[in-house]
Image (spheres, rainbow, N blue to C red):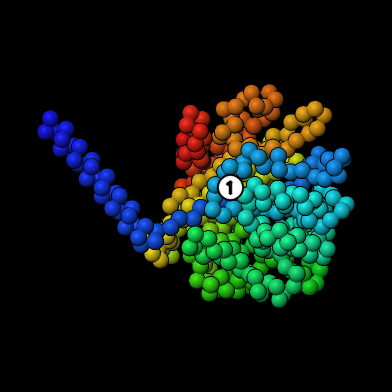
Amino acid sequence: MMKRTYLFFLVLLVYITDQQDLSAQQKEGAQTLSLLFIGDVMQHQSQINAAYDAKSDTYEYNSTFQYVKPIIASADYSIANLEVTFGGKPYTGYPQFSSPEALGHALQSAGVDCLVTANNHSCDRRKTGIYSTIDFLDNIDMSHTGTFINAKTRKLHYPLLIEKNGFRIALLNYTYGTNGIPAPEPSIVNLLDKELIMQDLKAAKGMKPDKIIAFVHWGKEYESYPNDYQTGLADFFVENGADFVIGSHPHVLQRMENYYDKERKKDIVKVYSLGNFVSNQRTRKRDGGAMVKIVLEKNKEEVQLKQMGYYLTWVYTPTIEGRKYWYIVPASEYEGKQAFFKPTSYEKMKVFIDDSRKLMEEENINAIEYTYDSVNSVWGFGK
């Protein structure tokens, strides 16, 4: 009896101590910030055609994001790569993208807070596309960075400073090129130029941010492993002040790294490619991607990376009553819902999941998949 009493008081003491520690942290202003990074948002012609409703002469995209909306909305701040322009009619897919503005509204409705716009399709509609995209995003109060109307607006608004939950985050965005179409003057598309990057990182550090993030469009398409150019640039960003480097463009997943840099005494995250968020690329490994979540904690002025992981996502494209749909589904949650899919589609999703997990388990450094607990209907960290 005395032993049980002792154990009870020991547990009670631990509980009280934990609550005191938590209370002390709250008094001292301990805060958290969850960041979600989303890959390539694309609209091929078949997607545009399917989104059109002839009766109302409108486009509908909310259904595309309905299954991942809870995850996106649960993050404090979400950033996606917009790999199309809002350049007006005629709406076109590959090779020169111009999407209906309904896509931007749907992204915002799903919980996306910011779009990075520097990529190889930024100039698809030349100056009109660059200007129209910026004007539209400004009009709906959607944060964005990477392309600019002119040097003056770039100087005023770059790097983009994100202020949320008591954190200050500096966001930079660059692309390796624009498919041979130069940015028409005076518009600017940020290119991967080391001298420019060094200047921008210096400006970012001058903002006194808690973290500096570089969202970079780079690499070789459809390659599952980063090349020397990517790894060298990632090191360059870190050496010059960036904390997190997030990659897009290859349209397939590449490895993720999360480690503590002893020399610089800070947490480093490198994600070489998030893969496709939504597109009509249906071949193996291109039909899905990942959303990466990073959780930061601030106690007084100290900021720590508390958690880093990823959600696998897959694009399901069923034809229902003669109309084709594009649904982004969280893979871990829906791999347990086989009846939701047409049989061949479910098998394709399983191939994507298996391929992705094999790559991530072999290549990743301290980056683990968020998985779904169907019994309790909650997401957990790791298996």
Residue 238: x percent and y percent? 52, 63
In which quadrant will I find the N terminus?
Answer: top left
Q: Nearer the viewer, residue 305 or 374?
A: 374
Q: Is residue 12 above or below residue 155?
A: above
Task: Check the image and report above or below for 7 versus 116.
Answer: above
Position of residue 296 relative to residue 172, above or below, is above
**SS of the residue under disc 1:** helix
Farthest residue, direction left: 2
**Percent of width and height locating residue 164:** 53, 60
Q: Is residue 220 visible?
A: no
Q: Residues within 10 Å of mark 1 (few under 14, many from 20)?
A: some
Residue that appears at 74% across and 72% down: 150
| Three-letter residue code for mark 1 | Ala
Task: Tell me which residue sits at (71%, 58%) in the image.
Answer: 140
Q: Residue furthest front?
A: 56
Q: Nearer the viewer, residue 68 or 367?
A: 68
- Quadrant in which residue 53 is drawn: top right
* Residue 28: image location, x then y, percent: 35, 62
- Give the side of residue 75 with respect to residue 195, left or right: left
Q: Residue at x 15, y 37 (%)?
A: 6
Task: Give how far across and how far down residue 127 sits, in percent.
Answer: 82, 65
- Which residue in the structure is indicated by mark 1? 73
